[in-house]
Image (cartoon, grey):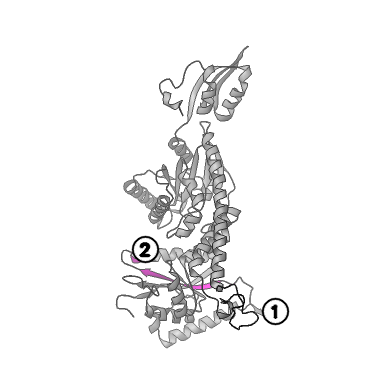
């Protein structure tokens, strides 16, 4: 055991009995015996099929993967931060369909280059995995391929990291063709450096007559199976990138069309499970998917919202963010996430009831910086206000005001409180692109009157013998087309607007 490291276990067994002291390797014989008995009972409980039929007295349940999660407390990270990150990892594992049976935290000066946690702790983890009957060990940080391989050899059990858990969740939740392609691209990018050989039987390097007397089946393509797999993955990655580039061009075309029509876009961003989809439904009366789980929304949802001054804006909701969001995932979803960078306003939704709300704000700002969306105006929205006490809520509002310099809006997507105020704030934060026009439109150009109704707000409309006397607030393009029929030039003092 390294003198600069320590290990802590912070969970109890499913039976409610603590798993033991801080050092698993020094547990008493009685403790180990108790653990083994509990592990054996859990194994029996999971044996739901015998001879092709359900075992009597046992309900058929969906099998889950039992995991031990591991965090490392490095310099600059507090024990509370590590604990919060492991809490989130546990939720991620649960969302992925697993069950966390124990957790281990080690304090180190730096990660071990070979095994991330050091050789002594690898042995302790191997014993812990055996005792608690775990199927996998999941690290809270991304492991290098060599570290993952060394850990699996040392622990003698499957070793995963936070990245692959997130990728697995994304793979479960992606529904659209583009979403599935983005997830697959990220998965293949993660898999490529982790490919391993598949044994001598599949490593046929000899080709044609140079099989070296190996006989039938000994003549291969002249490359190892590992190289074949790598080549196939690279070919698949290239195809996925081409497909996603086509999707990005389509999205760019739609964005340019919205700009031409001067449609203003508000993008909902925030930490995963902050309630973005629920708030979108409450604001627009739509039926976007809402589930109380991480990354329930992966595919972009677009809804229209008419506001009182006659404008109609577009709200977009896409994938939520998370701490340590895999870089490969950000790259794969970049074209989708960049929708936020093209928005006119960001609604940054924060779960006010979460104890790590401030850390979530920081994590979201980091991702926004990575996708180049820091210049877009931002409105922070504290959601789930009905689930937090007033004192905590006011303290959070003060810290946001002092540390970020922003005034947040408090809402509850569940009850609807504060939603009207939020819509008013959106209207204020989005600059109006309408002007007041007054004029006489001949009957030959009644299409312009119809457009004023469609794209603006008509205040008075009087039909005369020669045409329609009109007073309306319209968008700039309609105002330009009406210009020759107007009584006065509405932009006489601001000619630069006409140049747009």
Q: Which residue sits furthest left? A: 3
Q: Residue at x 47, y 53 (%)?
A: 274
- Position of 420 compared to 115: left or right? right
**Percent from the top left, x then y, of residue 205?**
56, 76
Q: Residue at x 54, y 70 (%)?
A: 227
Under circle 2, the secondary element is helix
The magenta segment? 63-81
25 lies above or below 183: below
420 lies above or below 326: above
471 or 232: nearer the eye?
A: 232
To which quarter of the image does residue 469 belong?
Answer: top right
307 lies above or below 356: above
Q: Is residue 324 magenta?
A: no
To which quarter of the image does residue 357 belong?
Answer: bottom left
Can residue 216 be seen here? The reply is yes
> Which numbered disc flags the more N-terminal residue, 1 or 2?
1
- Position of 465 compared to 195: left or right? right
Tell me the CA gap for discs 1 and 2.
47 Å
**Percent from the top left, x then y, of residue 336?**
51, 50
**Percent from the top left, x then y, of residue 424?**
46, 37
333 or 434: nearer the eye?
A: 333
Under circle 1, the secondary element is loop
Residue 81 - label: 2
User: Circle 1: is it few (<14), some (14-19), or many (20+) Cα within 10 Å?
Assistant: few
Q: Residue at x 44, y 22 (%)?
A: 491
**Residue with the mark numbered 1:** 52
Q: Is residue 79 magenta?
A: yes
316 or 8: nearer the eye?
A: 316
């Amino acid at each position: 055991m390294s003198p600069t490291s320590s290990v802590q276990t912070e969970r109890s067994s499913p039976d409610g009995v603590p798993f033991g002291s801080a050092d698993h390797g020094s547990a008493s014989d009685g403790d180990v015996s108790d653990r083994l008995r509990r592990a054996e009972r859990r194994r029996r409980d999971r044996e739901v099929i015998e001879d092709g039929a359900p075992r009597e007295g046992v309900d058929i349940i969906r099998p889950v993967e039992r995991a031990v999660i591991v965090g490392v407390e490095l310099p600059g990270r507090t024990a509370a931060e590590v604990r919060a990150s492991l809490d989130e990892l546990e939720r991620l594992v649960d969302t992925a369909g697993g069950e966390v049976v124990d957790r281990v935290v080690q304090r180190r000066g730096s990660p071990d280059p070979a095994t991330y946690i050091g050789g002594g702790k690898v042995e302790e983890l191997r014993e812990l995995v055996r005792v608690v009957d775990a199927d996998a060990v999941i690290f809270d940080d991304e492991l290098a391929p060599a570290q993952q391989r060394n850990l699996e050899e040392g622990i003698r059990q499957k070793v995963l990291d936070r990245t692959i858990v997130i990728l697995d969740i994304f793979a479960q939740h992606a529904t659209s063709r583009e979403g599935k392609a983005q997830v697959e691209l990220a998965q293949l990018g993660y898999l490529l450096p982790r490919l391993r050989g598949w044994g001598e039987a599949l490593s046929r390097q000899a080709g044609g007559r140079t099989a070296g007397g190996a006989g039938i089946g000994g003549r291969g393509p002249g490359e190892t199976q590992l190289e074949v797999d790598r080549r196939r993955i690279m070919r698949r990655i290239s195809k996925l990138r081409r497909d996603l580039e086509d999707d990005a061009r389509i999205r760019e075309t739609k964005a340019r069309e919205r700009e031409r029509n001067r449609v203003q876009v508000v993008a909902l961003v925030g930490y995963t499970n902050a309630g973005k989809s629920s708030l979108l439904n409450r604001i627009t009366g739509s039926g976007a998917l809402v589930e109380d789980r991480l990354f329930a929304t992966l595919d972009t949802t677009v809804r229209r919202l008419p506001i009182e001054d006659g404008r109609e804006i577009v709200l977009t909701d896409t994938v939520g963010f998370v701490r340590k969001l895999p870089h490969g995932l950000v790259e794969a979803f970049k074209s989708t996430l960049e929708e936020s960078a093209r928005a006119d306003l960001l609604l940054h939704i924060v779960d006010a009831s979460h104890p790590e709300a401030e850390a979530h704000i920081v994590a979201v700002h980091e991702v926004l910086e990575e996708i180049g969306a820091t210049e877009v105006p931002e409105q922070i929205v504290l959601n789930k206000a009905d689930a937090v006490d007033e004192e905590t809520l006011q303290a959070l509002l003060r810290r946001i005001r002092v540390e970020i310099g922003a005034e947040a809006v408090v809402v509850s997507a569940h009850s609807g409180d504060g939603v009207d105020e939020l819509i008013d704030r959106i209207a204020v934060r989005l600059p109006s692109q309408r002007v007041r026009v007054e004029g006489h439109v001949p009957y030959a150009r009644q299409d312009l009157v119809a457009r004023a109704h469609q794209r603006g707000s008509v205040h008075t409309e009087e039909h005369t013998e020669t045409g329609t006397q009109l007073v309306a607030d319209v968008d700039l393009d309609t105002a330009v087309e009406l210009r020759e029929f107007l009584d006065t030039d509405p932009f006489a003092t601001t000619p630069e607007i006409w140049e747009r």
